[in-house]
Image (cartoon, grey):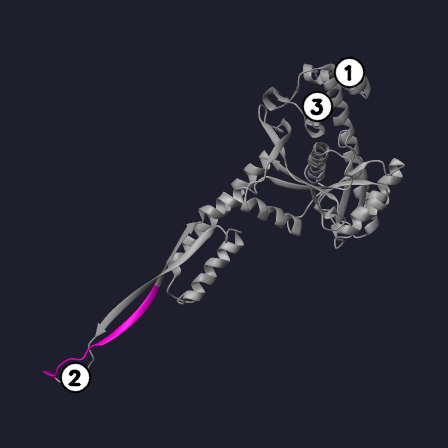
Amino acid sequence: MVYTLSVSDDGAVPIHHHVYPGNRNDETTHIETWDALCRLHGSPDFIYVADCKLCTQEQLQHIVDGHGKAITILPHNLVEVRRFHDQLRAAPIAKTLLWRRPKPNYPGSTESFYLFAGSYFTEQGHYPLYWFYSSEKSQRDRQSRQERLEVAEEKLAELAPRLNRAHLKRQAEILRAAKTILEHYRVDDFVDVRLQTHMHVTRKRPRGRPPGQKAVYRYEHHVTYSLHWSRKGAALAAEARTDGVVPLLCTDPSIPPKTVVQDYKFQARLEKRFSQFKTVHRAAPLLFKTIRRVEANMFVFFIALLIQALLERELRQKLTERGLPPLKLYPEDRDAPHPTTSQLFKTFDRLSTSTLTQDGRFYEEYHDELNQTHRTVLSLLDITEQEFWN
């Protein structure tokens, strides 16, 4: 099945969901989702942020015609992306620092975003197009290419001893096998493959000639190949200039570029909700045969995500308002700068109540002692200890 989910920018709280059959294309769901959000909000006066599946002329035009605003990322196969990458490979393009933020989950580290100089628009719809450079994405792109190069070279090294036998006797067959490896790991533009030819000559004396007669020798020529490769330094240097590039489309030219990239980076909070939906709540598998029961269970999961998000939002807002240090929710009393509901429940999981009874009559009740973290959480959520134990 296809499960769509929308969250608000205030705490990434789920506000809308829908369940589609598994053969429904993601590129056809955004119109229905945007219309539903307009009805919930009461107007189209909000920014709709989505992944690259939104980047179709039909869906973008529907939002613009409805006086809405949308931000999305361009797929890598669009001609605009290929053209800009070719420009970067040919020569560097000037860029200016736009935004710097702390790197998530890495205290003391920062992530920087730059805006490339120039004015750009999409071919269809003529929407404003911004080209950003992310320092974090640049590192990931460079590491990914390096890993693919190393794996491809390992495969070529495994191919080399198998030459000159079976289906690898001819030059065309060997080059085809090497090209298949490079294309599989998407490094065919960065590795130069060469075949070295070796000529082996064997002299054989013919059999059955009478003794004393002058021998006439026969020469046999046998060709073998050896495989050699090297990295293309110039191509790798040119490709490195495309690392970290993020193309973002915004249908409203009045939105500043910094707001565009900031709003899009919030998309990771939505992906986190999907991750929690699959891991913490363990939504799959759903062993039901009727669509109605599947949809009913998905609605229950949506309510669970909603309650979880509201609890996290309340807790984090109170921590910020009161200026308190991070809660020690992790093992070994480690800090939790961004407490999650699942970790919160684990902290309270082992607390228990003991009741003394005799012959069915109640005598006394004992509670486990709450530590400072427990009391702080209850205080932030405006829950008294008696309410908690009840």
* Depicted 377 relative to depicted 20: above or below: above
- Check disc 1 and give the amino acid type: Glu
Q: Residue at x 52, y 51 (%)?
A: 185
- Which callout, 2 or 3, points to the residue nearer the camera? 2
Q: Is residue 350 left or right of residue 17?
A: left
The answer to which of 353 and 1 lies nearer the viewer is: 1
- Residue 255 placement: quadrant: top right
Task: Determine the CA span between mark 2 and mark 3.
Answer: 99 Å
Assign a secondary structure to mark 1.
Answer: helix
Residue at mark 3: 348
Whether residues under marks 1 and 3 lie with C-beta atoms below 8 angstroms apart, the answer is no
- Counting residues from the start of the chain, the first of labels 1 and 3 encountered is 3
The reply to whether residue 371 is in sight is no
List the single residue furthest toward the bottom.
210
Q: Is residue 389 magenta?
A: no
Whole-percent x and y of residue 266? 71, 34
User: Mark 2 to mark 1: distance in Å?
Assistant: 112 Å
Query: Which of the two labelled residues, at mark 2 and mark 1, occupies the earlier sequence position?
Result: 2
Amino acid carrying mark 3 in the image:
Phe
Identify the mark at residue 385; answer none if there is no mark. 1
330, 113: nearer the viewer? 113
